[in-house]
Amino acid sequence: MTQGKSAARHLRDLREGGALTMAVSEAGQLAEMASQAEMALFVADCDRARNRSAVLRAIAKAVDYPLFFGGDLEALYDCLCDTITEQKTGVVLWLSHLHSADPALEDDAVNIEAVCADVAEFARDNGRAFAYYFEHAGRHAEPDTQPVAVSSRDQYDDEEEEDIDFDDSLDEDDDVEDGEVTDSDDDDEDER
């Protein structure tokens, strides 16, 4: 298939809505295709997301949804449906660098994709289109396992302790006995 036919097919798929299947190298054309289809493109950067809640936070941020909904997939559905109804023709959602092969995200990626399929159906029923593209990025790299040296020494150990004698705050000439309040003390409080 030539590049022109491929672009035409992707544009048609975009307007119909649903899951987009394309090579990662073609995904860079999503912005241009969304513009041609007069659809809003939202890119959710999922590269740092290591759990469902983080992926949903990336989606909410991408579509500028004012409420954070944790890991609630029903709330994701509501968020995306609200986003679609705000658009004239539809929405393209690109989940960029989704690490769907991470053990913590394997099942969630499937569930999020199922929600997106339901949202695409909602969009069709309401005369709009919702297309989505999951850019699967495999697993996250393992964190560095090199030990980090941490000092167990308390930073305050070397400082000299300063003894504070709170009794020195009263002048020896004060006539005030414990618990006795004078008129001059009341005047000081009134001035404050």
Image (tube, helix red, strand yellow):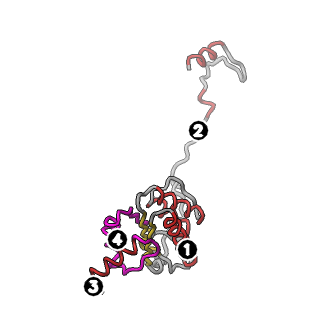
Instruction: Say which label, 4 or 1, has the lower sequence index.
Output: 4
Give the residue pinned by disc 2. 164
Q: Earlier in the sequence, mark 3 or mark 2?
A: 3
**What distance separates the C-alpha of mark 4 from that of mark 1?**
21 Å
Q: Closer to the observer: label 3 or label 2?
A: 3
Q: Position of residue 4 (x, y in %)?
A: 27, 80
CA gap, disc 2 and disc 1: 66 Å
Residue type at tag 3: Thr
- Residue 91 x/y as whole percent: 42, 64
Relative to 4, does residue 177 appear above or below in the rendering?
Answer: above
Q: For mark 1, give the secondary structure.
A: helix
Residue 2's disc number = 3
- Disc 1 residue type? Ala
Asked whether residue 52 is in view, the answer is yes
Span of residues in magenta: 15-44
Q: Is residue 26 magenta?
A: yes
Q: Residues within 10 Å of mark 1 (few under 14, many from 20)?
A: some
At label 4, the amino acid type is Leu
Which residue is disc 4 drawn over?
30
Q: Residue at the location (58% across, 17% down)?
A: 188
Please give the label number shown on residue 114: 1
Q: Which residue shows up at 38% across the image and 63% down it?
A: 39
- C-alpha gap between disc 1 and disc 3: 31 Å
